[in-house]
Image (tube, rainbow, N blue to C red):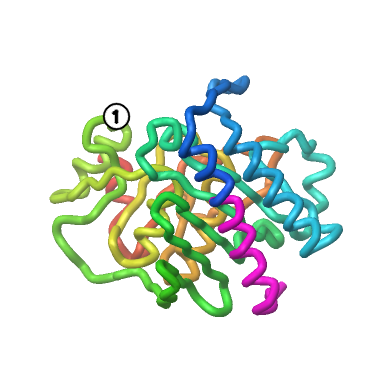
Amino acid sequence: MKLSTELEKAILQIARDAGDAIMKVYAQDFAVEFKGDNSPLTAADTAAHHIIEQGLNVLTPGMPVLSEESADIDWQTRKIWPRYWLVDPLDGTREFVKKNGEFTVNIALIEDGRATFGVIYAPALKLLWWGDDVQGAFSQQDGVTKKIAVDKTSRSPLRVAASRSHLDETTAAALARMGEVEPLSMGSSLKFCRIAEGALDVYPRFAPTSEWDTAAGQAILEAAGGVVLNLDGSPFRYNTKDSLLNPHFIALANKDLPWRSWLHD
């Protein structure tokens, strides 16, 4: 499904509107609730969810919307969807609560299991990224739009999206096998965007994520020439099973990097 320019612009505006609603809450003292999986929830998550869901329902009536804040749609219903919107209204709620600015609005179009279009807006940074499998990937800040692409240059150290201080054992072992690395810590879907614009090389993820956490970022990264893979090398796909949890994955600027050798001794 190729999106018209008008539809694409309207979806970008929905992401901005959701970001504006988030920033209104961000500027105040706000309450934090905790969901059943112990993940935080704020008024910003809820406000952004309603703006995005209502906006998409007006733009594409009849097309399903699966959002982190309305994820109780059963597999029997979901598995027959040929296309749908996959949304995280506020990705990085923990970053939002910490007030470090590293949170995003994520909107993705899924078609036959593939993330074919994605929008990510970081409202505190006033940075917007989007991309599709036809036109490529773009970023916009202060009204200036740029086409972006991954940097496939061989380099040392490798620029890796990873925390310097809170590494799980699997990621720490993978980094050790990479050789010389420059670990760069950042929240939410920003990691995909930074690879897409050439500022990072690798994002290994060996901890839990959900499908709405990755879809928009994958669409943008792959539109920019990168790739997201399962650890067996197969393409990373959506809506293929009952659970909405992702398998572990690796996101790469250059699929020819020796990433398999980083997984095992």
Percent x, y for residue 118? 57, 61
- Is 210 drawn above or below residue 168 in the view shown? below
Percent x, y for residue 231? 44, 47
Q: Crowding at label 1, few (<14), some or many (≥20) Cα neighbours within 10 Å?
A: few
Quarter of the view holding residue 56: bottom right
Helix, strand or loop status at disc 1: helix
The structure residue drawn at horizontal position 38% and vertical position 73%, both measured from the top left corner, is 149
Percent x, y for residue 213? 53, 45
For disc 1, the marked residue is: 169
The structure residue drawn at horizontal position 61% and vertical position 23%, both measured from the top left corner, is 35
Asked if residue 17 lies in the magenta stretch, the reply is yes
Q: In this view, does 117 lie to the left or right of 198?
A: right
Viewer-proximal residue among 244 and 68: 68
In the image, the segment drawn in magenta is 1-19
**Would you say the magenta stretch is mainly helix, strand or loop?**
helix
Asked if residue 99 lies in the magenta stretch, the reply is no
Viewer-proximal residue among 234 and 90: 90
- Is 254 drawn above or below residue 240 in the view shown? below
Viewer-proximal residue among 139 and 25: 25
* Number of numbered labels in the structure image: 1
Q: In which quarter of the image is the N terminus?
A: bottom right
Q: In which quarter of the image is the C terminus?
A: top left
Q: Which amino acid does label 1 sit on?
A: Glu
The structure residue drawn at horizontal position 40% and vertical position 37%, both measured from the top left corner, is 206
Quarter of the view holding residue 199: bottom left
Percent x, y for residue 239? 68, 48
The structure residue drawn at horizontal position 64% and vertical position 71%, both measured from the top left corner, is 8
